[in-house]
Amino acid sequence: MAIAVSVAAGEIASSDRRSGYDFMSRETRAMQDDDTANPGMLWVLEGGTLWEKKTGAAGRACADCHGDPRASMKGVSARYPALDAGKGRPVGLEQRINVCRTDRQEAPPLAYESRELLALTALVARQSRGLPIDIAIDARMRPFFAAGRATFHRRQGQLNLACAQCHDDNWGRQLAGNVIPQAHPTGYPLYRLEWQGLGSLQRRLRNCLVGIRAEPYDYGAQELVDLELYLMWRARGMTMDAPAVRP
Amino acid sequence: MDRRTSRRDFLKTAGGVAAGLGLGSVITVVPARATPAEMQEAIRKVVGGARISPGKVKLDLPPLIENGNAVPLTVTVESPMTEAQHVRAVHVFTEKNPQPNVASFHLGPRAGRAKVATRIRLADSQNVIAICELSDGSFWSDSAGIVVTLAACLEDGI
Amino acid sequence: MASALINVPPRAKRGEIIEIKTLISHTMETGFRRTQLGAVIPRDIIRRFVCTYNGTEVFSADLHPAIAANPFIVFSTIAIESGTLVFSWTGDNGFSVTESAAISVE
């Protein structure tokens, strides 16, 4: 049962929410819109190959349990981070894939930002394209959601900036030649022109933290998962568009 | 150097729009940039001593791009593309990249249409030149200027 | 693991000009980047792209480091007959990838 979470003062009103897509140039948008030109699709293609590959001591492929990802994975990434009942805390999609790797395939977990993990995440996320983000906060998720929200609003780093100051208070304005987006994670994992490659939301969050001269949380840290949970809730109802292209 | 020069100004001076890339703690220090003279030399190597006239070829570049890592570029040449009259090749050069050559595309009558598109890297705001070689041995050129802005939060070695 | 995405219309009318889009995964390391310790990261790029149509070369490109990572090339050819289009990319460090696509021309 979802608990009503009220929108705090300063948070973007529902009707004002816009995807990072809307802040990009026409050319970058065109790159995302065309599946034959979107470099992120190369990772989706690879993910499709990995999906069929038997691996680990159990000699299982994702396909053996999940069949055709277009059916079985539809809407999945729109619901992540999701509660892992066993662990009693939310996990991100990357972590969920690794749970399958270790528990079901009996294979070692894939490293963050490794080609394989990005390919599988891209394949799964692609199956939610066009669907609305579907995050509801229940009693069990509440403390993690609150932690993520607190992180978003907390001043950090040598520049002493909070995420909210750029992304709630100053979205649409310019920061050194680029427009500040609202920071909705609708398109992850995405092809960032700056990276010249595909990367996860965690990588992007770590970039931002380094940008404000704060110590970035480690990959897989609960702080990053909680922050992702808050960001996905903040973007609830917005349309997923992975794999996106962003500058 | 003024001690208060910001990191961004330093990077701009070094032409390093690609600075701070990659997970493996990479920085880019761009070596002495190609000069317009070096670009002319690179063009001469491809074109020989032939005269290059402006016209016939059209270079499409966005006037401004958010990131110099992937700039869409299209070159179109008005040509019937017949056996008797066609485009043999299209060559692209830049003025300020570390190296002036970008690509050479080889066409011919089988192409049907003289139009090629790709994505290129540009180290800084600059001019890009496209030169086409026709089957009658003539060379034609077009150039376009583009402004390259920088991403706001560069990734550092993390 | 290099993957390539090729977009060729599966069917065309004889004489029709068809547009072909190709995208291949490759970092196109320029050779101008350095590590934080100052060592140059050596150049590693795709240098040549060739498209043949039933064995005849119909398009080719010579690429330099200024081509963006994950090279994207769009070109056209006349659909003269049914058959196979073969695409090959070659480059530094023995890089070599070949893909093909069938086309039916009526």
Image (cartoon, rainbow, N blue to C red):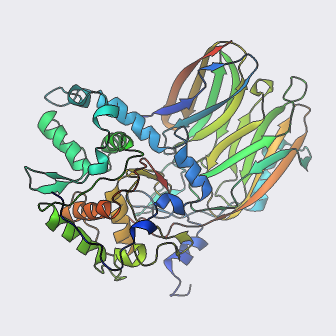
Rendered position, A24 above or below B112:
below
Task: State left or right for residue C16 relative to residue A7.
Answer: right
Residue A180 appears at what percent x and percent y? Answer: 48, 70
Please tell me which residue lies in front, A190 or C3: A190
Rendered position, A3 above or below B40:
below
Task: State left or right for residue C31 relative to residue A120.
Answer: right
| Residue A213 in view here | no
Dividing the picture into quadrants, the one containing residue A235 is: bottom left
Please tell me which residue lies in front, B66 or B93: B66
| Residue A17 in view here | yes
Residue A201 appears at what percent x and percent y? Answer: 34, 57
Quadrant (top left, top right, bottom left, bottom right) of the N terminus of chain A: bottom left
Residue at point 55% right, 60% down? A24
Residue at point 47% right, 61% down? A20
Residue at point 59% right, 67% down? B149
Residue B62 appears at what percent x and percent y? Answer: 68, 57
Rendered position, C99 above or below C104:
below
Residue B131 appears at what percent x and percent y? Answer: 81, 45
User: How many numbered markers are drawn?
Assistant: 0
Rendered position, C48 above or below B102:
above
Please tell me which residue lies in front, B53 or A193: A193
